[in-house]
Amino acid sequence: MGGGSSYTPELIEGFILNYKEFPVTEVWLVDIPEGKHKLDIVGKLAQRMVERANLPIAVHLTLDRREALKGADFVSTQMRVGLLQARIWDETIPLKYGVIGQETTGPGGMMKALRTIPALLDICKDMEEICPDAWMLNFTNPAGMVTEAINKHSKIRAIGLCNAPTGIYKWLMDLYDVPAEHIYAEFVGLNHLHWVTQVRIDGESKLEGMLGEHEGYTGKNVPQSSWNKDLIRALGAIPSYYLKYFYLQKEMLEDQIETSAREGTRAEVVKRLEDELFTLYQDPNLSEKPKQLEQRGGAYYSEAAVRLMKSLYNDTRDIQTLNVLNGNILDFLPPDACIEVNCVVTKQGPIPLPVSNVPLAVKGLIHAVKTYEQLAIEAAVHGDRSLALLALSHHPLVPSANIAEPMLDEMLAQNKHFLPRFFS
Ligand code: G6P
């Protein structure tokens, strides 16, 4: 779902590379009329990639998702409701109120959730009717909130994914010059709000020696401000680079204001990169994923997606970092909260592993953000402005309810076309 995404070549490459253990016979790339032009370009590249690999994978392009869902085993989502233009709004309107404007964190992330959750729940309704036993792999951001909404408000089995854990393994592979099988990293928290609380190489703990010594893994999409080394040592854990928006809020806001004035917001930078990618993708001689795709923050996401499908299909029982329902893993969160933790992947689904330690200091922030998330999910499902105001007023990055209200109303008005439940 969202087949016209510039990330699709990653997914196709993943199917090609893993064909032996995961013999995909059909891939249906589904989009909506507004994305048809992208679907045609990306879809033809996908077909060329499969032909070049000489594999019997049928690649279908369609705007008819009900047709595509027939017989589906896995439904993977990678959608951006409102396209990048809506992300530009998410990243610019909050800045006008002196608040961080970001794709998935804070007010921008809430607007993406309000636009996206109803669209995903509509897809789940079709799946309940056409392929009720299919797994939904949700990449669509904000991945943790969207996955929680699907598990709460539909009968579909959804697993949330992010590329950040894959990125961290690649960083550790490089740092210690070992293959991934020799590494164990433990993740605790939420999507885009996790801490790495264990790093083991061949069973030997390395975390102590790492604290404050390395900048840690940082995606291409977040300013590279430096961590406060004493804080990292006091934490005893390595925070996700998204936590710079919380621990370095002042610096990150200043950086956003400065860079958006100079080169535009991240979404505007990405828009230029996307245009370049789609020009590349149109080249009939291109039949592989171009390197430029690794300039996107979401690089390598398909490795995570295909690895998960492969393990579900083969009952591999390997350990992967996924977004799943909490149950009693984090005793300070509700059982129906979606959290990002290590899981054993089996045919009947991911089984979350107990976490070895949750730094006391981080429990409050995790709970505060999860409370915001759960309020925002209900606001999205019911099109409820007062719930959205409650969510925003309780987000740690929003300094005052007197900022939350006008900012919310401006964002709702700007997104009116994509918020039918608010403006029915
Ligand atoms: C990171 C996150 C993704 C996010 C992406 C944005 O990798 O894990 O969830 O969508 O960055 O990257 P972009 O290149 O679009 O700013």
Image (cartoon, rainbow, N blue to C red):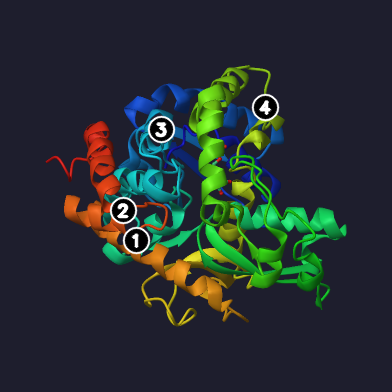
Amino acid residing under circle 1: Tyr
Instruction: Say if residue 393 shows up in the picture.
Output: yes
Decide: few, some or many residues near mark 3? Use Cα within 10 Å; few <14, some 14-19, many ≥20: many
Decide: few, some or many residues near mark 1? Use Cα within 10 Å; few <14, some 14-19, many ≥20: many
Q: Name the residue under label 1.
A: 372
**Do labels 2 and 4 touch, CB within 8 Å?**
no
**Do labels 2 and 1 touch, CB within 8 Å?**
yes
Position in image of residue 354 (x %, y %): 57, 81
Decide: few, some or many residues near mark 2? Use Cα within 10 Å; few <14, some 14-19, many ≥20: many
Q: Name the residue under label 2.
A: 392
Residue at the extreme right = 177
Q: Name the residue under label 4.
A: 287
Instruction: State which tag comes first along the sequence, 2 or 3.
Output: 3
Instruction: State which tag comes first along the sequence, 1 or 4.
Output: 4
Instruction: State which tag comes first along the sequence, 2 or 4.
Output: 4
Instruction: State which tag comes first along the sequence, 4 or 3.
Output: 3
71 vs 356, left or right, is left
Alpha carbon distance from label 1 to label 4: 44 Å
